């Protein structure tokens, strides 16, 4: 067996950070109470992570770039016929990646505009008004069910590959490497994950940090402080 490089470090850090953030956001949202503020903070982090992944999908290493794994119907048919020989996301897995990113982005974005009329108001809720904020709250709850369904499907696919196709998809996302036969290594059509590099990583991090700052309402004009009320006069007695 040969070792073949699949995932770079930024992709692996992104993946596991997103997993932890989503789990924490879900649990804290279900518990509510004092954890609801931390639920919101997890949402800010998720916004930054998704933006980082989008940028890294444009300027990162080849297996991370959308252009290397997002293909048309022809590639999907070839994969279903067993003719696909690439590394990284296969054409079916690419659909899962895009679906998860889209749903996670929508879920986090709606949370910025939502309110629960009790303990939490998103930092951008005032931009849309109360009625629209209530609609975002309903959409936020509805998207959660779709996201949970897609996560279950994603985990199910991992289990299927492990037990039916005898391919461990989790280990390469931890180590960055997979073991393949020499024939499979030669047949892989995707180049080894080079490119990206430290300058590209810094650019992606800075853009993600800017998006996170904007998500917290940091770009909104400061609300003028209420004028101080004059102190009540002391009684004459």
Image (cartoon, grey):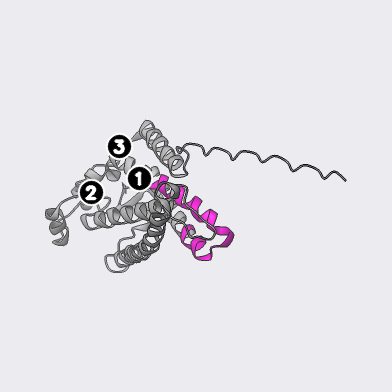
Q: Which residues are magenta?
A: 25-50
**Upstream in the sequence, badge 3 or badge 1?**
1
Is 107 left, or right, of 41 in this rendering? left
Of circles 1 and 2, the one toward us is: 1
Is residue 8 visible in the rendered image? The answer is no
Mark number displayed over residue 59: 3
Which numbered disc, 3 or 2, marks the residue that appears first in the sequence? 3
Whole-percent x, y for residue 155 in the image: 35, 64
Residue sitting at x 33%, y 58%: 169
Residue at the spot of label 1 = 53
Question: Do labels 3 and 2 touch, CB within 8 Å?
Answer: no
Residue matched to label 2: 69
Q: Looking at the rendering, which quadrant does residue 157 occupy?
A: bottom left
Q: Residue at x 31, y 53 (%)?
A: 102
Q: Secondary structure at mark 1?
A: helix
Residue 149 percent coordinates (x, y): 34, 66
Of helix, strand and loop, which mostly describes the magenta segment? helix
* Residue 75 x/y as whole percent: 15, 53
Q: Residues within 10 Å of mark 1 (few under 14, many from 20)?
A: many
């Amino acid at each position: 067996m040969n070792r073949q490089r699949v995932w770079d470090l930024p992709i692996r850090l992104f993946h596991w950070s997103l997993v932890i953030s989503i789990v924490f956001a879900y649990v804290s949202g279900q518990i509510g109470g004092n954890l609801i503020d931390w639920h919101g903070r997890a949402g800010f982090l998720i916004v930054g992570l998704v933006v980082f992944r989008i940028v890294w999908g444009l300027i990162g290493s080849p297996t991370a770039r959308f252009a290397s794994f997002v293909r048309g119907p022809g590639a999907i048919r070839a994969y279903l016929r067993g003719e696909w020989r690439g590394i990284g996301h296969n054409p079916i897995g690419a659909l899962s990646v895009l679906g998860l990113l889209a749903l996670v982005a929508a879920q986090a974005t709606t949370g910025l505009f939502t309110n629960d009329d009790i303990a939490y108001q998103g930092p951008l809720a005032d931009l849309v008004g109360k009625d629209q904020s209530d609609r975002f709250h309903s959409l936020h709850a509805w998207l959660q069910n779709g996201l949970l369904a897609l996560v279950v499907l994603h985990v199910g696919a991992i289990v299927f590959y492990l037990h039916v196709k005898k391919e461990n998809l989790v280990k390469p996302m931890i180590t960055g490497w997979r073991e393949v036969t020499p024939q499979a290594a030669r047949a892989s059509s995707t180049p080894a994950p080079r490119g990206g590099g430290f300058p590209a990583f810094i650019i992606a991090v800075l853009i993600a940090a800017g998006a996170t700052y904007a998500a917290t309402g940091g770009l909104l004009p400061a609300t003028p402080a209420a004028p101080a009320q004059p102190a009540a006069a002391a009684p004459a007695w």
